[in-house]
Image: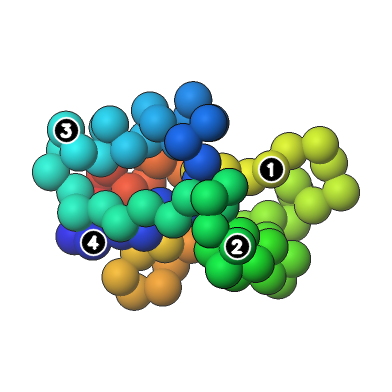
Amino acid sequence: MKVTVIGSHLCPDTLYALNQLAAAGVEASFKDILSCHADLMAYLNLRETSDVYAEIRGKERLGVPCFICEDETVTLDLNEILNK
């Protein structure tokens, strides 16, 4: 399985997720929203339009790490990815 992880190297939850995915043998590509303007803009668009972020929008939460599966499924739940 391949997954895209959106997050930041400064975020402990993102680092934990990347390590867990690597340990599980999941092929993950990483988009660091704090080091790439294009990735940040794509993430902000996703955050503003995806139902996954409905409970996060308007709160003081960033919503990373975010996982996008090969089938375009978006989730914020690492266990959902690890259990696929």
Front-lying residue, 43 or 73:
43
- x 44%, y 56%: residue: 31
Label 1: how many residues lie within 10 Å, few (<14), some (14-19) or many (20+)? some
| Kind of element beneath mark 2 | helix
- x 54%, y 63%: residue: 39
The residue that label 1 is drawn on is 62
Q: How far apart are marks 3 and 2 (CA)?
A: 29 Å
Q: Does 28 sit above or below residue 19? A: below
The residue that label 3 is drawn on is 23
Q: Please tell me in which quadrant of the rendered image residue 69 appears.
A: bottom left
Residue 79 placement, left or right of 43: left
Going from N to C along the chain, the mark reached first, 3 or 4, is 4
Q: Distance between the residues labelled 2 and 1?
A: 16 Å
Front-lying residue, 69 or 7:
7
Q: Which is more foreground, mark 3 or mark 2?
A: 2
Q: What residue type is labelled 1?
A: Leu
Label 2: how many residues lie within 10 Å, few (<14), some (14-19) or many (20+)? few
Q: In which quarter of the image is the N terminus?
A: bottom left
The numbered dot on residue 38 is none
Residue 17: x %, y % from top left: 37, 35
Going from N to C along the chain, the mark reached first, 2 or 1, is 2
Dot 4 and dot 1 residues touching (CB under 8 Å): no
Q: Does 49 sit above or below residue 2? A: below
Q: Which amino acid does label 3 sit on?
A: Ala
The residue that label 2 is drawn on is 37
Q: How far apart are marks 1 and 3 (CA)?
A: 25 Å
Q: How far apart are marks 4 and 2 (CA)?
A: 23 Å
The numbered dot on residue 2 is 4
Render colour scheme: rainbow
Q: Which is more foreground, mark 2 or mark 1?
A: 2
